[in-house]
Amino acid sequence: MPLVPSTVSEMGGVIPAFTLMPSLPPVGTRRPIKARDSQWAAATAKILARSGLRPNQISILSAVFAAFSGVCFAASVYVSKPWMVAAFFMGAAACVQLRLLCNLFDGMVAVEGGFRTKSGEIFNELPDRFADAFTLVGCGYAASLTRYGVELGWIAALLAVITAYVRTLGAATGAGQSFIGPMAKQHRMATVTVASLLGAGAAFFSWQGEVMRVALAIIVLGTIVTIFRRVGWVIRTLEAK
């Protein structure tokens, strides 16, 4: 059930109060996220709004967490003890999830919290492109001791940007935005998270690089399919008009 803001006065100021409404017309086109309609997400977004954090700041913070994930991945090859490698991989997984939470809450604070700005779309899209690159290139360096590990990381990052470009191209041409997969952002980051957790365990057998290389290969192949599917959807939609 959608959430809309009402306003309540607190200490002389006006802050958003999130309330459940039976219906609400959609505002623009948003990535479908089930968690957005959950009570815990609404409560967290309310806390963030009260704290003074604004949507654009949360969007930038998502790229910061992604950068930390990339650093954790890259740093894992410079330590020798398995438990340290595992710790870096676990830290990377945590940062990836924090990035995704920022992606959830920047939109909720903006739309449901009533803090949308005219430049909001720029902050919503641009940090994400950097975030994808930070994480995926970092994955490549985590697999740098394997054959083509680094190259797969850079290719995955490039394809992720192209995937987002096709989506926004659809919006620019009037077809609308398609978030179909099989390797949309949430699918890429889910793959990275699972690979990170598996890699943490594999570190005790020195197999973490192979785990990351396989994950990157899956992301690359899946992202290529995603690009073709989205391009096909845009073309069919435009031709049908």
Image: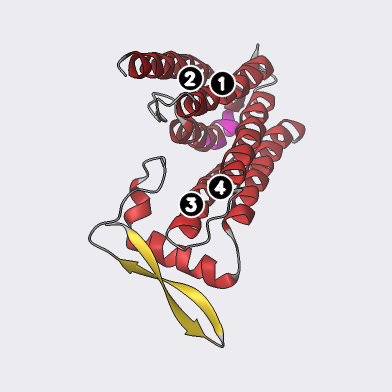
Depth check, front residue: 199 or 30: 30
Give the vertical position of 109 relative to 100 (above or below). Answer: below
Q: Decide: few, some or many residues near mark 3? Use Cα within 10 Å; few <14, some 14-19, many ≥20.
A: many
At 31% from the left edge and 57% from the top edge, which residue is drawn?
Answer: 2
Cα separation between marks 1 and 3: 22 Å
Give the amino acid type for the residue marked by disc 1 in the picture: Ile
At 48% from the left edge and 14% from the top edge, which residue is drawn?
Answer: 224
**First of labels 1, 4 by sequence position:** 4
Depth check, front residue: 33 or 213: 33
Q: In terms of image quadrants, where is residue 207?
A: top right
At 66% from the left edge and 35% from the top edge, which residue is drawn?
Answer: 130
Q: Which mark is residue 223?
A: 2
Cα separation between marks 2 and 3: 24 Å
Q: Disc 1 vs disc 4: which is toward the camera?
A: 1
Q: Which residue is mark 1?
A: 162
Q: Disc 2 vs disc 3: which is toward the camera?
A: 3
Contact, mark 1 vs mark 2 (Cβ under 8 Å): yes
Judged from the image, the secondary structure of the residue bearing numbered disc 4 is helix
Q: Position of residue 104 (x, y in %)?
A: 47, 50
Q: In terms of image quadrants, where is residue 204?
A: top right
**First of labels 4, 2 by sequence position:** 4
Q: Decide: few, some or many residues near mark 4? Use Cα within 10 Å; few <14, some 14-19, many ≥20.
A: some
Q: Is residue 125 visible?
A: yes
Contact, mark 2 vs mark 3 (Cβ under 8 Å): no
**First of labels 1, 3 by sequence position:** 3
Contact, mark 4 vs mark 2 (Cβ under 8 Å): no
Q: Which mark is residue 94?
A: 4
Give the amino acid type for the residue marked by disc 3 in the picture: Gly
